[in-house]
């Protein structure tokens, strides 16, 4: 988009509850794949499942600080609000997944199983280590029947000129030679 529109695109990543990051065109060109740094009056830190801050470059849950932008409370649940708060700090934020498509592929016993095709963020190397990280992330966030059984990688997911995903172009090769295709 920057090559097409020039240095007029500012990307942001934010939470409904408040707080977020922003990346300027210049920052993105210098650090491809980032969603930037915490915006004014916000803060960012990454924590593991035990609420321990992870070292720079490690994966975890992104926590955002509201700062002076306002307050947020889950409706009628102050305790839930308190349980979901951790102090924050600044720093560049990156994602390992740029885009993903999930669909059913053939399985001889069950009929279908879930396949994920991931387009890694620029600079992220696809492979067994990334697959393990992504499946581990899904394990406690998705029901078992919703969790992909396998992950394949692609440089770029197929999309039409308007950006709509061509899921059939991803799905059809898995169903080739089968009597039934969904």
Image (cartoon, helix red, strand yellow):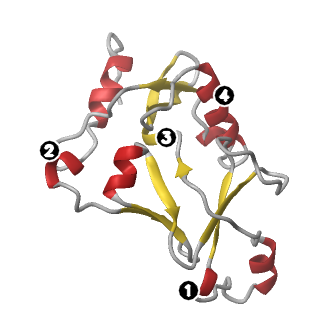
Task: Give the mark, 3 or 4, whose residue is nearer the N terminus.
Answer: 3
Nearest to the eye among marks 4 and 1: give it. Answer: 1
The residue sitting at 40% across, 42% down in the picture is 32
- Residue 33 percent across, percent down from the top left: 43, 44
The residue sitting at 61% across, 36% down in the picture is 134
Q: Is the residue marked by circle 1 packed among few (<14), some (14-19), or many (20+) residues within 10 Å? A: few
User: What residue sits right under mark 3 in the picture?
Assistant: 97
Q: Is residue 1 visible?
A: no
Q: Is the residue marked by circle 2 packed among few (<14), some (14-19), or many (20+) residues within 10 Å? A: few
Residue 11 in the figure: left or right of residue 111: left
Q: Contact, CB < 8 Å: mark 2 with mark 1?
A: no
Residue 155 in the figure: left or right of residue 140: left
Q: Contact, CB < 8 Å: mark 4 with mark 2?
A: no
Q: Is the residue marked by circle 3 packed among few (<14), some (14-19), or many (20+) residues within 10 Å? A: some
**Which disc is residue 69 wearing?**
1
- Residue 78 percent across, percent down from the top left: 77, 86
User: What residue sits right under mark 4 in the picture?
Assistant: 132
- Residue 144 percent across, percent down from the top left: 68, 40
User: What residue sits right under mark 2 in the picture?
Assistant: 161
How many dots with numbers? 4
**In the image, residue 27 above or below residue 30:** below
């Amino acid at each position: 988009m920057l090559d097409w529109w020039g240095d007029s695109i500012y990307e942001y990543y934010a939470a409904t509850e408040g707080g977020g990051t922003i990346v300027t065109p210049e920052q993105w060109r210098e650090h491809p794949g980032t969603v930037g740094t915490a915006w004014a009056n916000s803060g960012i830190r990454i924590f593991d499942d035990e609420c321990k801050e992870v070292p720079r470059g490690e994966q975890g849950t992104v926590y955002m600080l509201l700062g002076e932008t306002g307050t947020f409370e889950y409706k009628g649940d102050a305790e839930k609000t308190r349980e979901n708060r951790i102090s924050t700090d600044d720093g560049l934020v990156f994602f390992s997944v740029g885009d993903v498509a999930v669909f059913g592929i053939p399985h001889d016993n069950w009929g279908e199983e879930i396949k994920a095709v991931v387009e890694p963020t620029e600079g992220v190397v696809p492979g067994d280590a990334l697959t393990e990280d992504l499946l581990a992330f899904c394990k406690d966030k998705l029901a078992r029947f919703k969790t992909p059984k396998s992950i394949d990688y692609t440089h770029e997911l197929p999309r039409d000129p308007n950006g709509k995903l061509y899921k059939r172009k991803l799905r059809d090769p898995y169903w080739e030679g089968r009597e039934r295709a969904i």
